[in-house]
Amino acid sequence: MTKKTFEIEMKVRDYECDTQGIVNNANYLHYTEVTRHEFMESLGISFKECHGLGIDPVVSRADLHYKTSLTGGDPFLSSLTVERKGAKLIFHHTIRRKSDGAVCCDAWIEIAVLVNGKLSRGDYFDEKMKDYIV
């Protein structure tokens, strides 16, 4: 089964760069979070509404692999696919520099879902993400 991919374009802001002129590593984690939030919003999922229902998806693990650096002003594409692994949702992220398509970062973000403070399978998301979850 082929996974459906979600993708957005972003641009590096100068303040995200370190003294070497490249994006500080921690910002790639921010980029993946923005991508997940935009993805959820595109599916009509509001984190605020979820929280009001007692449903809280939380990052339980993050694994980032840095390949090549982005620099100030670089436009880039951030994409994700989703995998269901037991009770967890696994988001596979790829960040590519737009100018040449170079992969800058691959990330694997594991999400656990709490319902009323207790670990849950998070079935709430399955129907909404059905075109993306493998």
Image: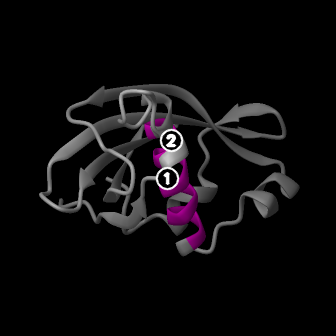
Q: Where's residue 59, x and y in %?
A: 58, 33
Measure the C-alpha gap from mark 1 to mark 2. Answer: 6 Å
Q: Does residue 36 sit above or below 41 in this rendering?
A: above
Residue that appears at 63% across and 57% down = 124
Total number of numbered discs in the rendering: 2
Using the image, tell me which numbered label, if any, was put on residue 63.
none
Using the image, tell me which numbered label, if any, was put on residue 13.
1
Q: Secondary structure at mark 1?
A: loop
Q: Is residue 3 left or right of residue 58?
A: left
- Name the residue tied to disc 2: 16
Quadrant placement of the N terminus: bottom left
- Inspect this view and state whether residue 48 appears: yes
Magenta-tinted stretch: 28-41
Membership of 91 in magenta stretch: no
Give the main secondary structure, helix, strand or loop, of the magenta stretch.
helix
Residue that appears at 23% across and 62% down = 98
Q: Nearer the viewer, residue 60 or 79?
A: 79
Q: Is residue 67 left or right of residue 45?
A: left
Q: Where's residue 11, x and y in %?
A: 42, 60
Q: Where's residue 128, x and y in %?
A: 53, 68
Residue that appears at 50% across and 30% down = 26
Q: Nearer the viewer, residue 16 or 56?
A: 16
Image-quadrant location for residue 69 = top left
Task: Check the image and tell me how it is coloured.
Answer: one colour
Tag 1: amino acid:
Arg
Residue that appears at 24% across and 52% down = 96
Q: Does residue 33 sit above or below 25 in this rendering?
A: below
Asked whether the beta carbons under mark 1 and mark 2 sit within 8 Å of each other, the answer is: yes
Q: Where's residue 71, x and y in %?
A: 33, 45
Q: Secondary structure at mark 2?
A: helix
Tag 2: amino acid:
Glu
Membership of 32 in magenta stretch: yes
